[in-house]
């Protein structure tokens, strides 16, 4: 939980949600190496949402 809080506070995590209850389907965490370079450190999709392209869409947004 401490790591999750730090990622949120430092804006180093992206989260994709779906549905009216905003269920978390995927998340991507990264570290900032420089102004133009970042390293993805974690990528996760809830097993119930795998195969639907959730993580692919989120990674595309993060890389933009």
Image (spheres, rainbow, N blue to C red):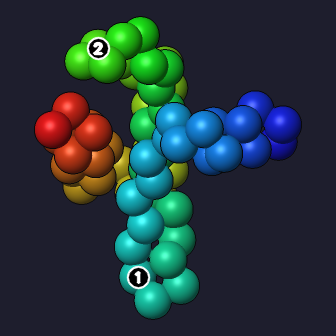
In the image, what residue occupies the spot 46% across and 26% down? 30
Farthest residue, direction right: 2
Describe residue 32's horizontal placement relative to residue 6 as left or right: left
Label disc, if present, on residue 5 of the rendered structure = none
In the image, what residue occupies the spot 21% across and 46% down? 61
Snapshot quadrant of residue 45: top left
Q: Quadrant of the image for the N terminus?
A: top right
Q: Which residue is identified by label 1?
A: 19
**CB of mark 2 within 8 Å of CB of mark 1?**
no
**What is the CA distance from the residue labelled 2 to the residue labelled 1?**
32 Å
Q: Is residue 47 visible?
A: no
Q: In the rendered structure, which disc, 2 or 1, sits on the residue that comes first in sequence? A: 1
Task: Examine the rendered structure and indicate whether residue 38 appears above or below residue 42.
Answer: above
Q: Nearer the viewer, mark 2 or mark 1?
A: 2
Farthest residue, direction bottom: 20
Q: Which residue is identified by label 2?
A: 37
Image x and y of residue 2, in percent: 84, 37
In the image, what residue occupies the spot 41% across and 10% down? 33
Q: Quadrant of the image for the C terminus?
A: top left
Q: Is residue 31 visible?
A: yes
Farthest residue, direction top: 33
Q: Residues within 10 Å of mark 2 (few under 14, many from 20)?
A: few
Q: Residues within 10 Å of mark 1 (few under 14, many from 20)?
A: few
Image x and y of residue 35, in percent: 31, 19
Describe residue 62's horizontal placement relative to residue 9 as left or right: left
Snapshot quadrant of residue 55: top left
Image x and y of residue 53, in percent: 21, 49
Mark 2, secondary structure of its residue: loop
In the image, what residue occupies the spot 36% across and 12% down? 34
Image x and y of residue 4, in percent: 71, 40
Mark 1, secondary structure of its residue: loop
């Amino acid at each position: 939980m401490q790591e999750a809080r730090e990622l949120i506070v430092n804006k180093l995590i992206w989260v994709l949600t779906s549905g009216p209850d905003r269920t978390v389907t995927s998340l991507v965490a990264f570290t900032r190496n420089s102004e133009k370079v970042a390293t993805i450190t974690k990528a996760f999709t809830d097993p119930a949402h795998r195969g639907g392209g959730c993580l692919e869409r989120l990674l595309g947004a993060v890389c933009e």
